[in-house]
């Protein structure tokens, strides 16, 4: 079978592309810009079209086209596939088909999805359950891949093989998934360009939870007030976890990744493993060895021009900003901490503006640089872009340690002003990652 992926460089859809490639199918792909991910596929001999999407990228012998939900309706490649009568699926639809043929553990929520799914996946792998894992990040344990193929046949008689996935709520994508276990680490306002209101978000999460079968299990963070709210009077088999659990103190002592939020993430993984009858001894050992994932508090020691600690982090929601900077200060209590933050999407920055201001006002850092908002193709509205900016955010924070710099000037500023010994955290879900790469080189 020949499969074409529109937006193959995306961190989610690329995992599915790896899956089809490893299954022996011929694949092609397209994306607007080159990246580490598109370069990986090119090295594997995959034809990847970079630049503006073109109808000619779709050949007549293509059997299936899979595209990101962010791809606009009049995308030329999508239209060509429809014209040729080629079967097309969104990434969530294609992944949803896999959830029907596997015993699926889906991690959903506003934050922590990637880390919890990664912890569960690596834990179950080390326990010998050999799961397939599809996550929105690259894992060192999976050779810097966002896919672990796992065993495609269950080791247990009359049971389906295991699949661990990150279930994204944007565009209500997770309504395509049919899990047996749902893990819910956090629930907050986000993606309000799609949901409009927090109540709509809650309603959609309830619809997703209703995908559980009668014997299904919901593993949920008891410390999250919104989770408790939507699960009130819930008929499902719920296993709660919280920082008050007896296992929390032990996890705090053994985890390599810092912060209370990571203790909660590890508790979610531990509870999931217990459901699957994995011995606690195995779980604690695996969690103690968890190395973290790509762009989730990813630490590198930079030696030039002067030695300092560089942290790369994907955080782009006010809560993620707050807890990650708190964890940075806890890990480096006596160090000077600099943060470079790139807001992600005008809509998010506008709708959560006051929450961002509060998070930055109390940020335990010595220097905070906020650069221009990363504009997400196909998701921005001009009227919103006129209303909000990084300069307005800096002005609202109104603290002496906060400043604005265009992205093009940050590298030279850091190299000129770093004296040695500092901790520099680069944070955001956009192309600020490029800066991290340059600083590491």
Image (cartoon, rainbow, N blue to C red):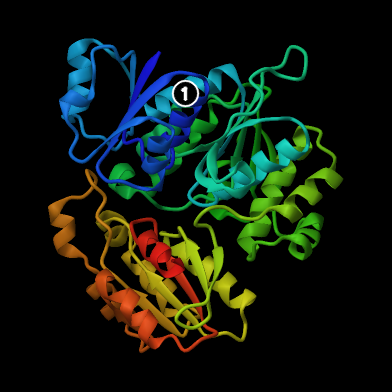
| Residue 201 found in image quarter | top left
Front one among 189 and 400: 400
Residue 358 x, y percent position in the rendering: 41, 73
Give above or below for 152 relative to 201: above
Front one among 307 and 247: 307
Q: Please indicate whether residue 308 sits to the left or right of residue 348 in the image.
A: right
Q: Residues within 10 Å of mark 1 (few under 14, many from 20)?
A: some
**Quadrant of the image for the C terminus?**
bottom left
Residue 142 x, y percent position in the rendering: 61, 42
Q: Please indicate whether residue 245 sits to the left or right of residue 417 in the image.
A: right
Give above or below for 97 relative to 129: above
Q: Kindly identify the residue that appears in the image at 53 percent across and 81 percent down.
A: 307
Label 1: which secondary element: helix
Q: Kindly identify the residue that appears in the image at 63 percent across and 74 percent down.
A: 331
Front one among 209 and 148: 148
Q: Kindly identify the residue that appears in the image at 77 percent across and 56 percent down.
A: 245
- Is residue 10 visible to us here? no
Residue 268 x, y percent position in the rendering: 67, 47
Front one among 300 and 363: 300
The number of numbered discs placed on residues in the rendered structure image is 1
Q: Which residue is mark 1?
A: 20
| Residue 169 found in image quarter | top left
| Residue 148 found in image quarter | top right
**Quadrant of the image for the N terminus?**
top left
- Is residue 173 visible to us here? yes
Q: Kindly identify the residue that appears in the image at 55 percent across and 61 percent down.
A: 298
Residue 204 x, y percent position in the rendering: 43, 36
Give above or below for 216 relative to 267: above
């Amino acid at each position: 079978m020949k499969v074409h992926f529109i937006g193959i460089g995306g961190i989610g859809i690329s995992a599915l592309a790896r899956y089809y490639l490893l299954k022996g199918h011929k694949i092609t792909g397209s994306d607007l810009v080159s990246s580490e991910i598109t370069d990986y596929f090119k090295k594997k001999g995959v034809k990847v079209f970079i630049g503006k999407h073109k109808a000619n990228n779709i050949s007549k012998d293509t059997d299936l086209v899979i595209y990101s939900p962010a791809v606009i309706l009049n995308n030329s490649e999508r239209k060509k596939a429809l014209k040729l009568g080629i079967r097309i699926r969104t990434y969530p639809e294609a992944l949803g088909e896999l959830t029907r043929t596997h015993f699926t553990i889906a991690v959903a929520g506003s934050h922590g999805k990637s880390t919890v799914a990664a912890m569960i996946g690596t834990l179950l792998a080390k326990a010998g359950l050999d799961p397939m894992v599809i996550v929105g990040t690259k894992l060192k344990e999976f050779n810097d891949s966002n896919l672990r193929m796992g065993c495609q046949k269950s080791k247990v008689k009359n049971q389906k093989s295991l699949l661990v996935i990150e279930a994204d709520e944007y565009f209500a994508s997770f309504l395509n998934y049919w899990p047996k276990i749902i893990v819910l680490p956090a629930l907050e306002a986000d993606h309000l360009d799609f949901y409009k209101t927090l109540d709509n978000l809650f309603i959609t999460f309830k619809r997703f939870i209703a995908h559980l079968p009668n014997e299904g299990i919901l593993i949920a963070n008891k410390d999250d007030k919104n989770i408790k709210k939507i699960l009130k009077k819930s008929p499902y088999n719920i296993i709660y976890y919280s920082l008050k659990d007896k296992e929390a103190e032990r996890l705090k002592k053994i985890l390599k990744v810092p912060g209370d939020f990571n203790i909660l993430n590890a508790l979610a993984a531990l509870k999931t493993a217990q459901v699957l009858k994995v011995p606690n001894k195995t779980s604690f050992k695996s969690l103690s060895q968890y190395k973290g994932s790509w762009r989730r508090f990813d630490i590198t020691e930079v030696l030039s021009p002067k030695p300092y600690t560089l942290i790369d982090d994907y955080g782009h929601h006010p809560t993620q900003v707050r807890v990650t900077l708190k964890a940075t200060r806890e890990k480096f209590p006596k160090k000077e901490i600099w943060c470079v933050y790139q807001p992600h999407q005008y809509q998010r920055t506008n709708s959560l503006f006051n929450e961002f201001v509060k998070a930055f006002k109390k940020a335990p850092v010595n220097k905070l640089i906020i650069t221009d908002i990363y504009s997400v193709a196909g998701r921005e509205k001009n009227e919103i872009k006129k209303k909000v900016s990084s300069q307005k955010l800096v002005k609202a924070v109104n603290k002496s340690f906060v400043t604005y710099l265009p992205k093009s000037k940050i590298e030279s500023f850091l190299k000129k002003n770093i004296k040695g010994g500092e901790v520099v955290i680069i944070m955001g879900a956009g192309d600020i990652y490029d800066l991290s790469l340059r600083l590491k080189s």
